[in-house]
Structure formats: C-alpha cells, structure tokens
C-alpha cells in the first residue's frame, strides 16, 4: 500500500481515503518553519476521524478544530512575545513578533479551508464513511 501526500492510499490502482485528512497544503507551507505545529494540527484532524458528533458534519468539525488549534498557536505566540519583552532580548522580541504575525495570518485564510479538506470529505461522502 502506498500513501500519497494528498491523503489518499492506493492499492492495485484503487484509491481509498486514509484515516485522517491531511493538514491543508497552504497551512503546511505557512507553518513550514514550525513542523511541531503541523504535527499538532494533524493530531486534531486525526481526532475528528476517530470520534463522532451526532448531527455535525465531519468537514465542519475539521474546520472548527483547525481554527481552535490556530487560536492556541496565537495564544502561545503572544505568551512567547510577553516572555521576550520581559527579557529585553531584542532578537527574541523580533522573532516572537514575526511568529505571532504568522500565526495570526494563518487563521483567517479561507482558501486552505475549502479545496483540500473539501476534496477529502467529499471522498468520504461518496464512500458513505464517517457519518455520511
């Protein structure tokens, strides 16, 4: 079995959805310097697929958990900035400001929400999986 980067598995030419949607490419690109953040996003997406919520579309849940985790990243970046400001380290302050701005920029992006995640969940709908 071969796992492709877009979250699909192929076996003898047959495509199936993997057990977890991929972190959207746009977010992976934006967070390329923070691989631990990408891992944390993947964890919440995996959780969406391992759990269910009656009456709530898994696609919507995926969007909500990504937005929530991005909110956590913003809070953490603010804490890092506060710590850097207290230390007075100009380099640490500059790095913390850049990180905070990046985390803020990740959150409102609409493009990452739709294409890759929607394709993943559309595949599940077609297969009748995960509450569809």
Image: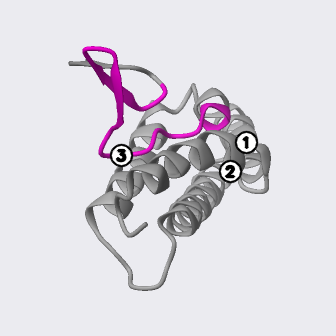
Which range is magenta? Answer: 6-27
Q: Nearer the viewer, mark 1 or mark 2?
A: 2
Question: What is the x, y in percent for residue 117?
Answer: 58, 47
Q: Is residue 126 above or below residue 24?
A: below
- Between residue 24 and residue 128, name the one nearer to us: 128
In the displayed structure, 92 sits above or below 60; it is above
In the rendered image, which residue does mark 1 sit on?
102
Q: Position of residue 83 (x, y in %)?
A: 58, 55
Disc 2 element: helix
Q: How is the image coloured?
A: one colour
Q: Position of residue 62 (x, y in %)?
A: 51, 61
- What whole-number distance in Å separates the C-alpha atoms at marks 1 and 2? 17 Å
Q: Nearer the viewer, mark 3 or mark 1?
A: 3
Q: Nearer the viewer, residue 73 or 80?
A: 73
Q: Is residue 127 left or right of residue 2?
A: right
Q: Are marks 2 and 3 in contact (CB under 8 Å)?
A: no
Neighbor class of circle 3 (other Cα within 10 Å; few <14, some 14-19, many 20+) is some
The C terminus: image quadrant: bottom left
Q: Residue 70's image quarter?
A: bottom right
Q: Nearer the viewer, residue 86 or 128?
A: 128
Query: How far apart are the alpha carbons under marks 2 and 3?
Result: 15 Å
Residue of label 2: 113
Residue under label 3 = 20
In the displayed structure image, the side of residue 25 where residue 121 appears, left or right = left
Q: Label 1, secondary structure: give it.
A: helix
Q: Quadrant of residue 17?
A: top left
Sequence-earlier tag: 1 or 2: 1
């Amino acid at each position: 079995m071969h796992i492709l980067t877009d979250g699909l598995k192929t076996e003898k030419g047959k495509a199936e959805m993997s057990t977890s949607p991929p972190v959207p490419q746009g977010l992976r690109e934006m967070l390329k310097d923070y691989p631990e953040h990408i891992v944390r996003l993947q964890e919440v997406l995996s959780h969406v697929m391992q759990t269910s919520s009656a009456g709530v579309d898994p696609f919507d849940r995926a969007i909500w958990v990504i937005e929530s985790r991005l909110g956590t990243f913003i809070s953490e970046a603010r804490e890092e900035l506060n710590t850097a400001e207290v230390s007075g380290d100009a380099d640490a302050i500059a790095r913390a400001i850049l990180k905070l701005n990046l985390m803020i920029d990740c959150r409102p992006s609409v493009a990452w929400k739709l294409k890759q995640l929607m394709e993943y969940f559309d595949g599940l709908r077609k297969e009748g999986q995960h509450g569809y």
